[in-house]
Amino acid sequence: MNYIDIIDRLRLPFRKEKELFSSLYAIMGFYPHDIHYYKQALMHKSVSRRNEKGRPVNNERLEFLGDAILDAVVGHIVYDHFEGKREGFLTNTRSKLVSRETLGKLANEMGLTRLIVSAGQSQSHNSYMAGNAFEALVGAIYLDQGYDACMRFMQKRILKQLINIDKVAYKEVNFKSKLIEWTQKNRVRMEFRMLKQDKEKETGSPTFCFQVVIEGVEGECGEGFSKKEAQQLAAKNTLKRLRREPQYIDAVFAAKTNRTKMEEEPSMAVPDTEQHPDDFIIKASSSNPESPESPESPDIPEYPENHPTSDEFDLSDITAVAKEKTREEIIAEAEAAAYTDD
C-alpha cells in the first residue's frame, strides 16, 4: 500500500461524516452539535452493535423518545393552529400527523430513508423502517438541541414545506372501516362493546366509551363525544395493537379456532331473542343497502356459511318430531317460535 492509498483511507471516514453533516442539514435546516445521536438514529436494529456495557446500540430507544416528543410538539402546534376546536378533533388531527404512514412518507420525501443503515432490508420488507427512523431523528434532535429545536423543525421544515395541516385535519380516515375489512378478510368475529355512557360535568355533553372485542378477546378502548368518535378511536388503537403485538393476533386466532371447533359439534342451543341495540357487529352482505362504509350503518359480523345467527330460528330444534308432523305443521311451529315475545 503506497502513501496515497493510506491518505485516501484516512480521509474516507471524514468524507463520509462530512456527507452526513450535509445531508442532515438539508433535512433539518441546521447542523448537528453531536453527530453521534444522529448516527444512532439512523441505525436499524438489524445492524445494531453492543457498547462497552454489552447493551445493543440501535435507534429503538431514540424512536421511543422521539415518539413522545412528537406527540407533545405536534399536539402543541395543532392546539395553537385550530383555536376553539374540541379535544376529539385535536386528537384525531394529531394522530393523522404522527401516524406511521405519514412519518414514513415524510422520511422518503426528505431523503431520510436513504441514510438509514440496515442489513440489506428494503423499505418494502419493513414498512415501519422509515417512520421509525423519523421518530428516532426527532429524539436525536431533542437530546442534541432541545425541545425548541424540535418545534422549529416540525413547524418550518415539515408543516410549512411538506404538509398542509388543514388538508390533513379535514381528511377523514375511517379506522373503523379498516378494522372491519381486516376482520372480514380473516373471517373473525368482531364487535364494538359500549362500556359506559356518561355526561361531561362542565357542559353536560354526552360521552361514550367503546371497546373492540375480536373473537371474545378484548381489544383497545376509545372515548368520545359521539358513538362514532369513540368507535373510531377504539378501532385505531386496536389496529395499532394488531400491528405491534403478534401475541394479540395469536390470541384472536386461537379463540377463532376454538370457536369453529365447537361449531362443528351438534348444538341444540335456543336462539337469543333479545335485541342488543348497542352491539355493533359485522356481517358481509352485498344486499345490505347500508354498507359498513357508511358511518351510521350497523356493523354486522361475517358468519361462516350456514351458521345460524341470533335473529334466525334454528330448525334443528324441531327435527326430532319431523316424522310425526306434516310440512305445514313444522313451518307453522317454526314461525311461532321465531316470533314469540317470550
Image (cartoon, rainbow, N blue to C red):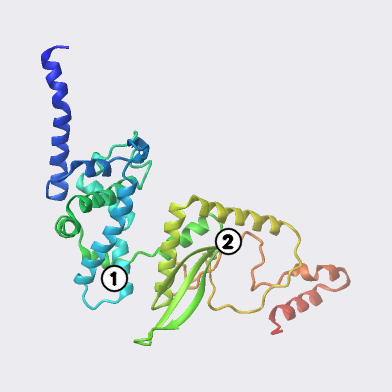
Amino acid at the residue labelled 1? Leu
- Image x and y of residue 165, in percent: 21, 64
Vertical relation: 137 (above or below) 340: above
Residue furthest to the top: 2
Between 33 and 70, the one lying in front of the other is: 33
Residue 238 falls left or right of residue 160: right
- Image x and y of residue 281, in percent: 54, 69
Q: Quadrant of the C terminus?
A: bottom right
Q: CA distance from mark 2 to mark 1?
A: 32 Å
Q: Is residue 85 at all visible to an observer of this figure?
A: yes
Q: Earlier in the sequence, mark 2 or mark 1?
A: 1
Q: Which residue is mark 2?
A: 215
Q: Which residue is mark 1?
A: 90
Q: Is residue 284 at all visible to an observer of this figure?
A: no
Q: Quadrant of residue 256?
A: bottom right
Amino acid at the residue labelled 2? Glu
Vertical relation: 268 (above or below) 341: above
Q: Residues within 10 Å of mark 1 (few under 14, many from 20)?
A: many
Residue 197 falls left or right of residue 330: left
Local secondary structure at mark 2: loop
User: Pointer 2 and pointer 1: residues touching (CB < 8 Å)?
Assistant: no
Q: Quadrant of residue 306?
A: bottom right
Q: Quadrant of the N terminus?
A: top left
* Residue at x-position 58% and y-position 77%: 276
Between 35 and 169, the one lying in front of the other is: 35
